[in-house]
Image (tube, rainbow, N blue to C red):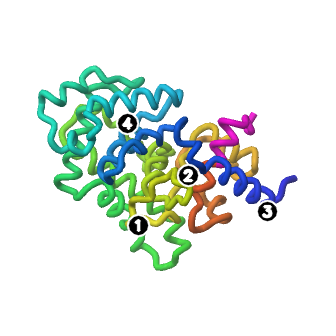
Amino acid sequence: MISKEEIRDLLEVKTKEYNSPKFISTDPISIPHLFSKKEDIEISAFLTATISWGQRPVIIRNANSLMQKMDFAPYDFVIGASLKELKTLDKFVHRTFNGIDAKFFVLALRNIYEKHNGLENVFAQGSKKSCHKSTKAQSVLKIAPMQNSIIHFRETFLSIKHISRSDKHISNPGANSSAKRINMFLRWMVRKDNAGVDFGIWNSISPALLQIPLDVHVGNVGRKLGLLVRKQDDWKAVMELTDQLRAFDKNDPIKYDFALFGLGIFEDFNS
């Protein structure tokens, strides 16, 4: 039976292998890497993460198409697009995410930047809601500030008038959703990455508090390594796997997402 030390060593090796610039071009993170302005990066990253389900080449193609419709100036489009300009999104579609959703997302983001001081501030405010409940660091981690962060963001995002069909595109960990795409977005924004893949442009949230972006590949590799017992890929599984990864690196536990994902996608380790 493989020991925890051997698992950690394997994950460290695979993290260094996949947490590399060569990873960017085949991953949805390539879209926000088109930009240099903070607001452009975070908006393009959020929209790309939102549609990140299905085949990765299709995700990248459709996210690029969405940026094209926004004239490759997502922040300017979010803040200033007229009703006529918003109509350019009418024909956008990625699986069940369509033009109605795209227009609502732009308006919801506009509300966040105009009335809530931007995406980073909303997520940071939510993460602090749970921190006051305990003075012990370990207890704070078990409370999962990022769960509160995502719930607070979701409530803020959905606070403007919209059609209820769009609600499903913002995951709710309060209902035990794994919130994979939002956790992936948060990894991109928060994690301080010397390899140049993740951006680390948000300083108000600690990378130590991040939760694993749990998809079927990450979950299956985690189970094969004995790091995850729970069978469902839900928020409880996210907490369980992240706690195991935190034991390997308490300051940057989600760096191992690269290893778990890479082993599952590129090496078929979970079969």
Q: What amino acid does circle 3 point to?
A: Glu
Specify few, some or many for label 2: CA neighbours under 10 Å numbering under 14, 14-19, or 20 or more: many
Q: Earlier in the sequence, mark 3 or mark 1?
A: 3
Residue position marked by numbered label 1 in the rendering: 130
First reached walking from the N terminus: tag 1 or tag 4: 1
Give how far across and how far down residue 118 sits, in percent: 26, 55
Task: Give the residue number, with chain letter if any, for mark 2.
Answer: 212
236 or 10, which is in the foreground? 10
Instruction: Give the CA distance from mark 3 to mark 1.
Output: 32 Å
The x, y position of residue 157, in whole percent, is 28, 46
Mark nearer the N terminus (2 vs 1): 1
Q: How far apart are marks 1 and 4 (CA)?
A: 24 Å
At numbered mark 3, what does the secondary structure look like: helix, strand or loop? helix
Q: What amino acid type is highlighted by mark number 1? A: Ser
Q: What residue type is labelled 2?
A: Ile
Please give the residue where the numbered disc 4 appears in the rendered image: 169
Magenta run includes residue 242: no
